[in-house]
Amino acid sequence: MMSSEHLTCGWLQQLLVVLLKLCLTFAGPLRPLNGTQCAAKGPASYILVFTGHWSPQAFPKQYPLFRPPAQWSKLIAVSHNQHFRLWEEGAQASAGVQNFAELGLTVDLMKEAKEARKSRSVGAMYRTAGIPNGIGHSSTELLMQPRNSLLSLMVKMIPSPDWFVGVDSLNLCEGNRWKQGVTIDLQPYDAGTDSGFTFSSPNFPTSPAENITKITSQMPNHPANSFYYPRLQELPPIASIRITRQSRSPDRQTPMSNHILPNSISPQRFLATPLDCEVSLWSSWGLCLGPCSRGGVRHRTRYILLRPANAGIPCPELEEQSECVPHSCMRLQ
């Protein structure tokens, strides 16, 4: 005969099996642990179009016309999960981000992504060709997987000390569905590794390095900064991205070439940014010319630092005169 211990053990095992079946029956499908996880069934194909809006009308201050003219580097994009960050506002730039933001080099940035790929934190890496003008388009096809539904990208502004535009951890999945499309206006960021104020500033390393920050119309708060427009509440978009989901049919779609804008996408028009005149400080007063007692005059001058554009405030007078004072007279021989 079986002992009472064996009978009790068998009864407990059967009870556990029944309880487990009940749990599986009423639990329903598994849900993502947090908002960054995707429960979509299967991958999704997208077309990403990057558009540069960097024009002399929207950004007239110190607009680069030559050596080199305003242009965009190649676009670097990475699909990943919540365990990877290509770049992050408020955090320090990695070596790869620094080399890309300062020099446009992608080697270290790609190495960082490939290293994260070993742990499956990164899915795929994409790139487009650069754009030789401030206004233009580039595009690439994306294949997003549920396990790596986040998208990050960077494009360097050329010329600039360490400025770029980008997207950090954009989730193209909502719960168990892929988004149909996303459009985002982009603003410039400072990588925090070079202290230059203007587009063509010479190399001036920031030591110690600072965090990545967004550049605004009033930050950095310095008149010499190329993006300093104190009359504006915010800068107009300097670039934008449009991500559109594609239907994947058995017949492969024709890939989109760089700089070719699809008919369904039209370039955006932005109001011209007014640029006020900026002048230097007054020079010191010159010596008086004419009689020392009455009728003599003295002069001082200033010069234009920045000419107005797009209906900005015109320049004030550049020369001023006043009556002589006895101690500054010059007697004519």
Image (tube, helix red, strand yellow):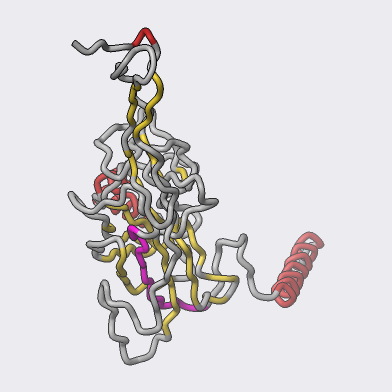
Vertical side of 141 occupied by 215: above or below: above
In the image shown, does 37 or 222 lie closer to the viewer? 222
Q: Quadrant of residue 311?
A: bottom left
How far across and how far down the image is residue 100, in percent? 29, 48
Residue 130 visible to an observer of this rendering: no
Report whether 230 appears left or right of 78: right
Report whether 33 appears left or right of 320: right
Q: Residue at x 81, y 62 (%)?
A: 4
How far across and how far down the image is residue 186, in percent? 44, 59
Q: Residue at x 40, y 79 (%)?
A: 265
Q: Quadrant of residue 11?
A: bottom right
Q: Residue at x 36, y 67 (%)?
A: 50
Query: What predominant SS class does the magenta segment belong to?
Result: strand
The count of marks equals 0
Q: Quadrant of residue 301?
A: top left
Q: Is residue 201 magenta?
A: no
Quadrant into which the N terminus falls: bottom right
Q: Residue at x 40, y 52 (%)?
A: 86
Q: Which residues are magenta?
A: 41-56
How far across and how far down the image is residue 169, in percent? 48, 58
Quadrant into which the C terminus falls: top left
How far across and how far down the image is residue 39, in percent? 56, 72
Vertical side of 123 occupied by 307: above or below: above
Vertical side of 60 occupied by 226: above or below: above
Residue 240 visible to an observer of this rendering: yes
Q: Residue furthest top?
A: 327
